[in-house]
Image (tube, rainbow, N blue to C red):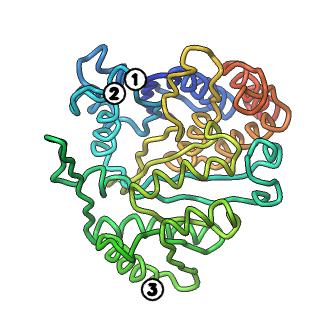
Amino acid sequence: MQWNILSLPGDGVGPEVIAEAEKVLACIAECFEHRVELARGHIGGAAVNVEGTPLSETTRRAASDADAVLLGAVGMPEYDDAPPARRPEKGLLDLRKELAVYANLRPVKAYPSLAGASPLKADRIEGVDLLIVRELTGGLYFGTPRGLDAGRALNTMAYAEQEIDRVARIAFDLAKKRRGKVTSVDKANVLETSQLWRQVVTAVAREYPGLELEHLLVDNAAMQLVLAPRRFDVLLTENLFGDILSDEAAVLAGSIGVLASASVGARRADGTLPGLYEPIHGSAPAIAGKGVANPVGAIGSVALMLEWTFGLGAEASAIDAAVSQWLAAGPLTPDLGGSASTSQAGDAICAAIRRAHGAGR
């Protein structure tokens, strides 16, 4: 099989972690005898520096033509006060729109070897294995009107039934393959958008007999994530709530650096499922260029890509197993208490893959 992938390293630590993700991708292709056609482009602040815009038309076309996009991170401090059209984050938002990816999937798993890395007690996070399904193209981040002028700011949260329905169906479809429970997060006691959210999700649930649906207000959901995280299987949220809760859930895994994500939408006419794959962490400018960033979130995103876009479960599992071995045996990166460099972590994970799946086996 040939994989046509666009790599967008982006800003800050993005190029460092994506280099290791590409290394693991090449290792998997070698061991499982696939072909990789890898193109590279710019996004975010890096694109502004080179092309004058956070997402050029050339990159848009390349992303649309690719089977999948691998992204590092966006964000540079020097653009914090830039006009909206030149902010690095606009490149990411525009890319999501370009690819029509409306569901962000963020798996969170508590690895036994990282129990000590979490600020929560080990017995509280033991066995945690949840999936956050975040609506990605609606809500406050995209609603209009919006603006900041003369000491007054305005953002608009808006959702249509169809936007809620389509992401809810992804959540329920995934729950069927997991433990059969969907927790829908909203603020229906005060927000009309959440009242519609609850109505639509409840209606979709009727089409999935045998699955459990519960509704939680977002403030309670935030509390339950740290008090009783094992209660969750699939969490379904709107855009803003999902952004916040998924970062909170990073404490369950021990480090935000180990968490991957997949952003997907509808299948194309030929049945393929294009996607945008990225670690959930940001550009981390404070450690950029130091070679100490944890690449596992980016590497795990490759595993999600292989599973979701290319349907290659064995290859994805090979990466997951190698990551688990690395987390147990090291050498770990500084965020996990070790002293290994980003590239040493990537090398160790590739070595584990080759030990288990030598080329041609």
Horizontal relation, residue 278 to residue 201: left or right: right
Element under disc 2? loop
Instruction: Residue at 48% x, 22% y: name it.
Output: 12
| Label 2–label 3 contact, CB within 8 A | no
Name the quadrant containing residue 207.
bottom left
Residue 110 % position (x, y): 73, 52
Q: In the image, is residue 225 above or below residue 146?
A: below
Q: Amino acid at mark 1?
A: Pro
Q: Which residue is mark 2?
A: 80
Horizontal relation, residue 179 to residue 2: left or right: right
Q: Which residue is mark 3?
A: 206
Q: Mark 3 packing: few (<14 Cα in 10 Å), some, or many (20+)? A: few
Element under disc 3? loop
Q: Which residue is mark 1?
A: 77
Q: In the image, is residue 215 above or below residue 147?
A: below
| Label 2–label 1 contact, CB within 8 A | yes
Element under disc 1? helix
Q: Amino acid at mark 2?
A: Asp
